[in-house]
């Protein structure tokens, strides 16, 4: 396959939404090792089997192939930073994580929503990966909302619906989108030079209305996830902002603006201004959360040991 074909296949695989796990084990001298994996699959109840796939290029590949036992920790929505940590090649992952020893001394992350300890059952060579099949010898469940992963981005299941319906119940609503194209944003500009994200027309405040407005202008928009829900005090309404990508020449009244040059001083709404500034920052770091709040104070639903972080 050419590099382009490989990228296209990776994107196609990425359409499959998954949860996120951290797979753990110990070296012979007891040093804990772990990596983030979304290749987890439950396989069999009789006997109890699960599988994960490990890349032959992973630093911990040899350790996992040799170890008799391994653990699988299913992450909850608060553990996005744990996923990031274990997806890194840091040598001190466990020094930065909250962990304890499970059955057979397997290191586990107790804040996870489910943990499994497995005895290695079978290894199947599979191209640039090895499929590790484990027989479950112990497991625990700690129900909480799961962390989702889709097309290279984390998502929280259920949070979007909760935020959107709360905003819709609260009264006047606008629906807009941060539309990205190769490191630039598509922005609307009115006759006075005021800048905003494109939004749905007043007579069709809905996602189809927003999409139709853009396609009628010759654009090809693709929405992927909810990005922000905030109280826009200047316009006395709640704004629901999605994220997506767009292609096509900017129509009249719109322009593409490089992310580092967003003219924030021409964005009338302070809440929208802080959202755009946050987006530019997150884009640089490749991590996104769902913002809920207003211009002064908000909450980013996402990440980390912290459930939410005050802005
Ligand atoms: C959401 C997500 C899912 C991943 N799934 C896998 C996977 O299933 N198998 C794998 O080998 N690597 C996967 N990775 C990449 C590894 O976590 C990454 O290569 C890590 O550096 C491996 O750790 P190590 O090099 O210390 O062994 C995933 C990364 C992320 C962010």
Image: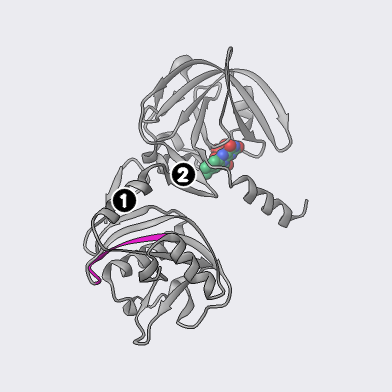
Q: Quadrant of residue 125?
A: top right
Q: Nearer the viewer, residue 212 or 265?
A: 212
* The quarter of the picture showing ligand 1: top right
Residue 25 image position (x, y, % from top left):
52, 25
Report whether the residue tagged 1 is closer than 8 Å to ligand 1.
no
Part of the protein shown in magenta: 235-242
Circle 2/circle 1 CB separation < 8 Å = no
Mark 2 or mark 1: which is in front?
1
Question: Residue sitting at 68 percent across and 53 percent down?
Answer: 8
Residue 145 image position (x, y, % from top left):
37, 36
Question: Residue sitting at 33 percent across and 55 percent down?
Answer: 291
Q: Which residue is denoted by mark 2 in the rendering? A: 84
Q: In what quadrant of the picture does the C terminus appear?
A: bottom left
Question: Is residue 297 depicted above or below 81 in this figure?
Answer: below
Badge 1, how many Cα within 10 Å: few under 14, some, many 20+? Answer: few
Q: Nearer the viewer, residue 266 or 104?
A: 266
What residue occupies the far front of the structure in this picture?
203
Question: Is residue 184 depicted above or below 139 in this figure?
Answer: below
Residue 17 image position (x, y, % from top left):
53, 42
Q: Judge whether residue 240 is colored magenta.
A: yes
Instruction: Answer with mark 2 or mark 1, whichever residue precedes in sequence.
Output: 2
Asked if residue 54 lies left or right of residue 138, the reply is: right
Asked if residue 123 lies left or right of residue 271, the reply is: right
Do we see residue 69 in this rendering? yes
The disc label shown at residue 165, or none? 1
């Amino acid at each position: 396959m050419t590099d382009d074909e490989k990228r296209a296949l990776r994107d196609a695989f990425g359409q499959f939404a998954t949860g996120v796990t951290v797979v753990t084990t110990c070296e012979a001298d007891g040093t804990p090792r772990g990596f983030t994996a979304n290749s987890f699959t439950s396989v069999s109840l009789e006997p109890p089997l699960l599988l994960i796939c490990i890349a032959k290029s992973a630093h911990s590949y040899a350790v996992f192939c040799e170890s008799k036992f391994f653990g699988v920790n299913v992450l909850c929505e608060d553990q996005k930073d744990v996923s990031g940590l274990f997806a890194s090649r840091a040598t001190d992952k466990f020094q930065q994580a909250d962990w304890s020893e499970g059955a057979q001394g397997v290191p586990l992350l107790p804040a996870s929503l489910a943990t499994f300890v497995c005895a290695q059952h079978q290894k199947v060579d599979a191209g640039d990966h090895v499929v590790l099949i484990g027989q479950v010898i112990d497991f625990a469940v700690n129900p909480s909302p799961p962390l989702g992963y889709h097309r290279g981005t984390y998502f929280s299941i259920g949070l979007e619906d909760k935020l959107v319906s709360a905003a819709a119940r609260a009264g006047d609503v606008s629906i807009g989108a941060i539309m990205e194209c190769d490191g630039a944003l598509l922005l609307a500009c009115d006759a006075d030079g005021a800048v905003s994200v494109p939004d749905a027309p007043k007579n069709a405040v809905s996602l189809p209305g927003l999409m139709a407005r853009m396609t009628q202008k010759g654009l090809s928009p693709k929405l992927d996830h909810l990005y922000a829900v905030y109280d826009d005090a200047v316009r006395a309404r709640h704004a629901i902002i999605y994220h997506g990508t767009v292609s096509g020449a900017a129509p009249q009244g719109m322009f593409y603006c490089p992310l580092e040059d967003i003219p924030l001083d021409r964005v009338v709404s302070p809440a929208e201004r802080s959202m755009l500034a946050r987006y530019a920052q997150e884009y640089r770091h490749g991590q996104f959360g769902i913002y809920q709040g207003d211009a002064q104070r908000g909450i980013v639903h996402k990440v980390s040991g912290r459930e939410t972080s005050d802005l």
